[in-house]
Structures are given as structure tokens and as C-alpha cells.
Amino acid sequence: QVQLVESGGGLVQAGGSLRLSCAASGRSFSGYCMGWFRQAPGKEREFVAAISWNLGRTYYIDSVKGRFTISRDNAKNTVYLQMNSVKPEDTSLYFCASKRCTGGNTWYARPYDDWGQGTQVTVSS
């Protein structure tokens, strides 16, 4: 059974940094893509970033480019989201998700199959 467990959320001031972790277990993630999503109250869940497990290829939405970095540690089966220069609009519940990678230019796109429970990030102004 696949398990994705997020951690690292919390309260941070605008301009500060936070690192989210997603511990993955239950299968080999070789050939899989990992994504970070976020959902603010009253809003739809939004894709943030993705990484391919084998090649480490990454993709980000425009609003986080240059501020967030997604990475993975194969030995620890863990994916990270380093969040720098955070803004109040980054406040959300952040989720980790996995899917088997697809090819082409939209390899990062939904749908994702497995999801964690989320970790809350709150950015104060």
C-alpha cells in the first residue's frame, strides 16, 4: 500500500523559508513522477511543482519559479519542496502526490494516483 506522508509545514513570515518533505513508501518509485499541490480555503487544488524520480526532471508553475525548488532523495524515498521568499498568497494546505510518469511535454500533468494528507503552510504578512 502506497503511503505519502508530508511534513514541514508551519507558520512563517513573508520573505522567509520553509522546507516541506514527503516520505514515500509502499513500492519502488522508479519510473514515477512526484508532484506538490496546494489548496487554499474555498479554492481548487492547484498544481505547484513536479519531479521525475529517475531523471530528476522538474516543472514549476510560473508563480513559484525562482522561489521554490523541488528535489528528491532516492536513498530516503523522500521528495522535498524548498520554499524561499514566501508570500502570503502561498498560504495553503500542501499535498504530495505520485503517478507513473508519462512522456512528452506534459509529463507533469494530472491525473495523479496517490495522495498524502497534506501539511499546512501559513505565511504572515
Image (spheres, helix red, strand yellow):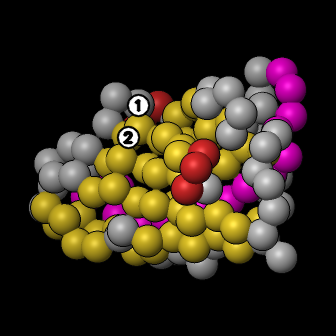
Above or below: residue 21 compared with residue 6? above
Q: Please identify the quarter of the rendering in which residue 92 is found.
A: bottom left
Viewport quadrant of the C terminus: bottom left
Viewport quadrant of the N terminus: bottom right
From the image, tell me which residue sits under label 2: 68
Q: Is disc 2 placed on a helix, strand or loop?
A: strand
Number of numbered markers: 2
In the figure, is residue 108 to the left or right of 89?
Answer: right
* Residue 49 in view here: yes
In the figure, is residue 62 to the left or right of 29?
Answer: left
Residue, x 49% and y 65% (percent of image)? 94
From the image, tell me which residue sits under label 1: 65
Q: Amino acid at mark 1?
A: Lys
The segment highlighted magenta reads 87-104
Q: Is disc 1 placed on a helix, strand or loop?
A: loop
Q: Please identify the quarter of the rendering in which residue 121 is found.
A: bottom left
Residue, x 60% and y 61% (percent of image)? 96
* Residue 36 in view here: no
